[in-house]
Amino acid sequence: MADISKLRNIASQIRRDIIRQVFNCQSGHPGGSLGCTEFFTALYFEIMDHNPDFHMEGKGEDVFFLSNGHISPVWYSTLARSGYFPVAEMATFRQLNSRLQGHPATHEGLPGIRVASGSLGQGLSVAIGMALSKRLNGDDKKVYALTGDGELQEGQIWEALLFAAHNKVDNLIVTVDWNGQQIDGPNDEVLSLGDLPGKWAAFGWDVVRLDHGNDLEAVIAALREAQSRSGKGKPVVILMKTVMGKGVDFMEGTHQWHGKAPNAEQTERALAQLEETLGDF
């Protein structure tokens, strides 16, 4: 059974790491990172069978792909706090010659990163490729991927959905961060996504609804439900409702903090709302 108190402490520290990374370099994407903190905490500290002794091929372990790579701060913090690389290295976020680039990249050899991402729409295709590779190699571990909801406006996403369903890629669990916001404003104003559950189901996916994506217990339950549905002939998607900027009151629920760094006063206000539980970098 999950130790929810421990996981909440981890999530609080990850949120502090996000704010401090983005503030230090005055660049980055705090909104979506904060909104996905419970998801990353649950995935890496409770759900996935993964190994910080990183090997690119990921044989015999679950692997994760971040398609909406601009929310790299939450992933970097999660990886560091999981033991993939030193926590202190987060101080180099978005610096010249750092392994922690604004969008995750493989050139610098950062453990945990298997593909460069952030050019939206591509990560799901890569995840499908890895899932097929595992199937061909008799590897029964799962592939997880995260996309943004605004990212679903990319045509390549829908090609990938068709391909995965047609080829019964049922060792794949995709989660959509359904926060209703993107860089230019609310999804419904920029380009409405319509009936997302109906669309994914019509494309042949098994759909899990997660209406409380900032509740750790609900996230864990949804991921376990998705696991129970995998291996049955259909790829699985979790449609996860979150609040952009969750945890920092003045950042919550608005696209204004999609890609904006807080100033010193705002950073102090944000950190005052987030308990330091594991020690800052």
Image (cartoon, rainbow, N blue to C red):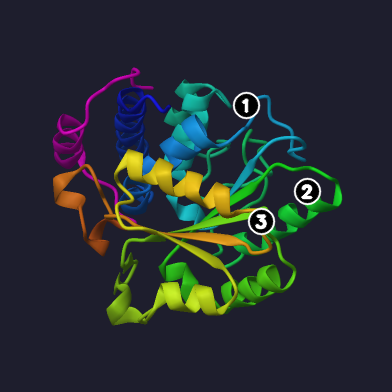
Please identify the quadrant where the N terminus is shown: top left
Front disc: 1 or 2:
2
Q: Start and end of the magenta stretch?
A: 259-281
Of 52 and 219, nearer the camera is: 219
Q: Which residue is drawn at 32% across and 72% down?
A: 184
Secondary element at image label 1: loop
Q: Do the residues labelled 3 and 1 touch (CB within 8 Å)?
A: no
Residue position marked by numbered label 2 in the rendering = 134
Amino acid type, label 3: Ala
* Residue for badge 3: 127
Q: Where is residue 46 in the image (x, y as percent from the top left)?
A: 48, 32
Magenta span contains residue 277: yes
Q: In the current view of this chain or complex, which residue is farthest to the right?
A: 137
| Numbered marks: total | 3
Mark 2: which secondary structure? Answer: helix
- The answer, for residue 90, to whether it is visible in the render is yes
Q: Nearer the viewer, residue 5 or 80?
A: 5
Alpha-carbon distance for marks 1 and 2? 19 Å
* Cα–Cα gap, marks 2 and 3: 11 Å
Q: Horizontal and vertical percent for residue 155?
A: 57, 79
| Residue position marked by numbered label 1 in the rendering | 52
Residue under the point 44% across and 41% down: 40
Up/down of 161 relative to 176, above or below: below
Q: In this view, does 114 lie above or below 186?
A: above
Of 128 and 153, the residue lying toward us: 128
What residue is shown at x 36% (from left), y 33% (from top)?
A: 14
Label 1: few (<14), some or many (≥20) within 10 Å?
few
